[in-house]
Image (cartoon, rainbow, N blue to C red):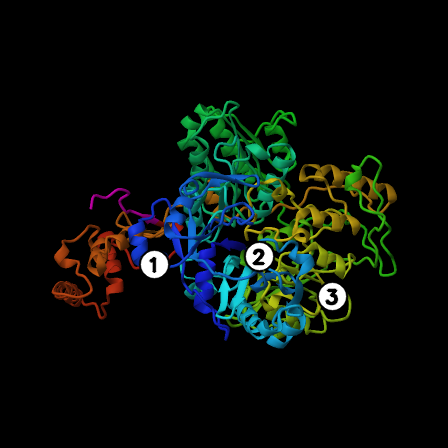
């Protein structure tokens, strides 16, 4: 989940609106917000109680321990509040390592009370469920609540009742306040669950004879639940942590991300920094940031972000130009570095995304040279050779120093090169084009017979994996503890393994088939697909050069019956159906045979809830603290010991350590992950993994060395027998990619002049659809653009009501009469534009892919 902090004002507003409790909550909605632009006269009109009550004032900018920092003004008059704010409002302050400006304050009524009336309440999410903490002594000096407070775990799908609260949490609470506290905590927990909070702390919670007062509140919500809670949340804001400003460029990228199926993220850490990144992939972005920090670049790291999920060329261009715009605003005496990195992509067309980046580099070539920017590129994946080629060419044509590397170079090696820790090697000459690498040199279309054995030893059922011992040359802090891998070894996959894919993920299936083919498998590893939203049918795929059909079933039962050889499920189900589909499949005998079967989830929604204990044991997996969708059914499945999730390698695992070195809280990856407690940090996970027998490098930059060392050790022991490498079979390039790369050309079959739907948004006669809505053109205006390719007079573009509506009816009647005169049997507004296109372009109506259509719309049109 993406746990994002909200302001105290937002948290209290939601609580006052939606909490349901018999406890009398006082001072509901009594708060006033003050900023440097506040009109005090208007504020007093909206909140007249400011003149009649004693007041409390404090900054509302996600600052912890405000009382101890002297950032709370207590028992003040309105004039006292103004005097207290004068040296603080709009001025810079230091909180820990972070420096920022105090510009948002909250004023509330002062509540007279005694220390004995202050309590502490906190609810937070973990992978096991939600913990409720209560301490009978709240306030500024509450101390270590984890050690002091009474704690109660409420499991997923469990309810919290008042009797449990009294028995487990209110042990030391005053007897006369137990009923009020129990009712409030029960209502608070239900509110926490209903609105998808992940953290909710009230300190102090004051209970007097008049009722309950919520003095200070801190909260986080699961931002991925926006589609569920939109009605109650409203337009919720997620303010940046204190010390980091909210930049319009971040909002711009967030807007692009919201409108796209791809993932686009940007967080500015230090706009004056020297090191900038443009990394493909949520995991890769963490790895690169971790390596930069590990090599001493933390103070110069300017941004964190990532682009992934197969963004289009236009989306990548928009993302890249935003980065380049930011990094060329202030000069650095040592010049600047741009790291364009990534691992080996699964499905993203690297050439297409790099073309977007190349466009941005060309547009900003002047500022880039002026600011002495050096660019380092490392990428792999589909069509990466073409992407690297165009990236290298733009460096030569623009004069910008661009160092380009592919899969022959370790993923983070370019970081060491950029920071001067590694020499920059001489780059090998690049091919003039990339078509021939996909062709079979022998000219044969058949799959070569298998000529090599597996590169690992498949253990027999009666064998036990030997203990792994590091070689002396290995870094000592990477060596596992003596408690090495124990337990029974299991072969996860073989060349005969068959799987069922849940979900209509055709690109993923084709990728699997291509991989099977180049691995010289005799048959595809995908036996069938399950997609409950259509009837049974067959889906066409490629096996090498040939077309094959794979059955698609509506029901899992039919798929299992027809394919008894299957023992692997690849589940692409959404959050709503991941649990049910997994549990259904586990009910079949071919996978529920008592052994440790293999299940692979390729969606984070499934992985959040399914993790294998494997050889590490249940307690170790719990200590690793993997991210979960707490509060949903997927967070716990009783059959975990029989499930293996292949997100962790057998020998080597690395978790990023980046968050420990930042003064500000930064959320990483697609889901914006962050550590909420010590056990969730990368340091704790690395230590647990090391104790469990896993080789953990000190940084990702050392991963290659550790892999080499472990490999040589296993070869020396005979656990791995190196096999002779042979050239794999080649997979033909898809037509769509070949055309996109400019390797082939084909004339379009149709022409259109109605609209252009190829970009980020529809374009009507040169006008983006967003502009159509902004100018409130109405139906008549839209029809004018579509039918006549021009803006019509206002009298023919009516509003929803009024005399102009009659003119629209008249216009529609005129065109309907025209169609009747041309012997058309039916006439509706949806085909008028198409009909005019037929007459104008002299061709029939069409429904065709856009890449086979010539768009003859004007690029710039005066309207």
State yes or no: discs 2 and 1 in contact (Cβ < 8 Å).
no
Q: Position of residue 541 (x, y in %)?
A: 56, 58
Question: In front of the other: label 2 or label 3?
Answer: 2
Residue 131 or 372: which is nearer the viewer?
A: 131
Q: Classify mark 1: helix, strand or loop.
A: loop
Q: Earlier in the sequence, mark 3 or mark 1?
A: 1
Measured in 3D between alpha carbons, the distance from the residue under mark 2 to the one under mark 3, in whole angstroms, is 47 Å
Which disc, if any, is residue 141? none
Q: Earlier in the sequence, mark 2 or mark 1?
A: 1
| Residue depicted at x 20% and y 64% | 800
Tell me where the magenta segment starts and ends, as one range. Answer: 854-863
Residue 344 visible here: no
* Quadrant of the snapshot with the N terminus: bottom right
Residue that mark 3 sits on: 642
Residue 552, image x, y percentages: 56, 67
Q: CA distance from mark 3 to mark 1?
A: 60 Å
**At which x and y percent is residue 459?**
83, 55
Direction from residue 551 to residue 390 in the image, left or right: left
Give the residue pinned by disc 2. 139
The answer to which image quadrant residue 388 occupies is: top right
Residue 673, relative to residue 808: is it above or below?
above
Total marks shown come to: 3
SS assignment at label 2: loop
Regarding residue 768, the answer to whether it shows in the image is yes
Task: Say which of 187 and 705 sits in front.
Answer: 187
Q: Position of residue 344 (x, y in %)?
A: 60, 43
> Dot 1, how many residues are within 10 Å of its Cα: few (below 14), some (14-19), or many (20+)?
few
Between residue 532 and residue 62, name the one nearer to us: 62
Q: Is residue 143 above or below residue 443?
A: below
| Residue for badge 1 | 47
Q: Residue 328 lies in what quarter of the image?
A: top left
């Amino acid at each position: 989940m993406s746990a994002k902090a909200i302001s105290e004002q937002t948290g209290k507003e939601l609580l006052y609106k939606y909490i349901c409790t018999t406890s009398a909550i006082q001072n509901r909605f009594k708060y006033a917000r003050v900023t440097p632009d506040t009109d005090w006269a208007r504020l007093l009109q909206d909140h007249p109680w400011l003149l009649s009550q004693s007041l409390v004032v404090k900054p509302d900018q996600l600052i912890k321990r405000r009382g101890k920092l002297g950032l709370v003004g207590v028992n003040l008059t309105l004039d006292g509040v103004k005097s207290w704010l004068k040296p603080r409002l709009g001025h810079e302050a230091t909180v820990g390592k972070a420096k920022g400006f105090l510009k948002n304050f909250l004023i509330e009524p002062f509540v007279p009370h005694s220390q004995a009336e202050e309590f502490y309440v906190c609810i937070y999410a973990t992978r096991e469920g939600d913990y409720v903490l209560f301490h009978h002594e709240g306030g500024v000096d509450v101390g270590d609540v984890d050690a002091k407070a009474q704690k109660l775990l409420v499991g997923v799908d469990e309810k919290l009742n008042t009797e449990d609260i009294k028995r487990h949490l209110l042990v030391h609470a005053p007897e006369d306040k137990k009923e009020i506290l129990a009712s409030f905590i029960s209502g608070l927990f239900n509110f926490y669950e209903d609105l998808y909070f992940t953290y909710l702390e009230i300190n102090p919670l004051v209970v007097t004879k008049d009722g309950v007062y919520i003095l200070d509140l801190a909260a986080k919500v699961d931002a991925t639940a926006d589609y569920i809670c939109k009605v109650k949340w409203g337009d919720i804001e997620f303010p940046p942590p204190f010390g980091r400003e909210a930049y319009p460029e971040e909002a711009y990228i967030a807007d692009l991300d919201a409108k796209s199926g791809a993932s686009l993220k940007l967080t500015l850490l230090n706009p004056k920094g020297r090191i900038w990144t443009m990394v493909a992939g949520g995991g890769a972005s963490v790895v690169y940031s971790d390596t930069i920090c590990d090599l001493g670049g933390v103070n110069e790291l300017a941004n964190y972000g990532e682009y992934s999920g197969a963004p289009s060329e236009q989306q990548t261009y928009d993302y890249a130009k935003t980065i380049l715009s930011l990094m060329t605003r202030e000069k650095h005496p040592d010049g600047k570095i741009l790291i364009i990195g990534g691992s080996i992509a699964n499905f993203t067309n690297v050439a297409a995304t790099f073309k977007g980046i190349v466009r941005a580099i060309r547009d900003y070539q002047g500022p880039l040279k002026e600011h002495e920017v050096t660019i380092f590129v490392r990428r792999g994946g589909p069509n990466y050779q073409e992407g690297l080629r165009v990236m290298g060419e733009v460096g030569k044509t623009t004069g910008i120093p661009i160092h380009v590397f592919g899969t022959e170079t370790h993923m983070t090696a370019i970081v060491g090169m950029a920071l001067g820790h590694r020499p920059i090697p001489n780059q090998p000459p690049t091919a003039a084009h990339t078509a021939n690498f996909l062709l079979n040199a022998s000219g044969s279309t058949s799959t070569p017979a298998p000529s090599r054995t597996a590169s690992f030893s498949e253990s027999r059922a009666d064998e036990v994996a030997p203990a792994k011992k590091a070689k002396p040359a290995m870094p000592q802090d990477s060596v596992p503890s003596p408690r090495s891998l124990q337990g029974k070894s299991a072969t996860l996959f073989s060349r005969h393994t068959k799987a069922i894919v849940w979900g209509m993920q055709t690109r993923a299936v084709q990728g699997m088939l291509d991989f099977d083919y180049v691995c010289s498998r005799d048959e595809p590893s995908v036996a069938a697909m399950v997609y409950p939203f259509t009837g049974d049918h067959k889906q066409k795929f490629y096996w090498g050069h040939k077309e094959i059909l794979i059955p698609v079933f509506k029901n899992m039962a039919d798929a299992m019956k027809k394919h008894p050889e299957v023992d692997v499920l690849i589940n692409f189900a959404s959050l709503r159906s991941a649990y049910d589909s997994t549990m259904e499949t586990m009910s079949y005998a071919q996978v529920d045979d008592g052994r440790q079967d293999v299940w692979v989830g390729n969606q984070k929604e499934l992985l959040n809830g399914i993790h294998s204990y494997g050889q590490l044991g249940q307690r170790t997996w719990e200590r690793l603290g993997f991210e979960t969708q707490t509060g949903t059914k997927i967070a716990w499945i009783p059959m975990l010991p029989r499930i293996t999730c292949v997100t962790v390698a057998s020998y080597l695992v690395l978790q990023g350590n980046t968050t420990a070195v930042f003064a500000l809280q930064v959320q990483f990856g697609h889901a914006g992950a962050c550590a909420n407690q010590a056990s969730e940090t990368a340091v704790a996970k690395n230590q647990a993994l090391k104790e469990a027998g896993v080789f953990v490098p000190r940084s990702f930059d050392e991963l290659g060395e550790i892999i080499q060392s472990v490999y040589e050790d296993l070869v020396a022991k005979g656990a791995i027998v190196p096999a002779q490498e042979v050239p794999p079979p080649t997979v033909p390039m898809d037509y769509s990619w070949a055309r996109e790369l400019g390797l082939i050309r084909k004339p379009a079959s149709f022409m259109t002049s109605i609209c252009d739907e190829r970009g980020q948004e529809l374009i009507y006669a040169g006008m983006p659809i967003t502009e159509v809505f902004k100018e409130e053109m109405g139906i008549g205006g839209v029809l004018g653009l579509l039918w006549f390719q021009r803006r019509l007079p206002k009298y023919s573009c009516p509003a929803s009501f009024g005399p102009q509506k009659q003119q629209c009816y008249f216009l529609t009647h005129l065109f309907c009469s025209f169609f009747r005169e041309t012997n058309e049997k039916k006439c509706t507004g949806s085909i008028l534009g198409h009909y005019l296109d037929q007459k104008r372009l002299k061709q029939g109506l069409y429904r065709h892919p856009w890449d086979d259509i010539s768009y003859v719309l004007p690029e710039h049109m005066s309207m």
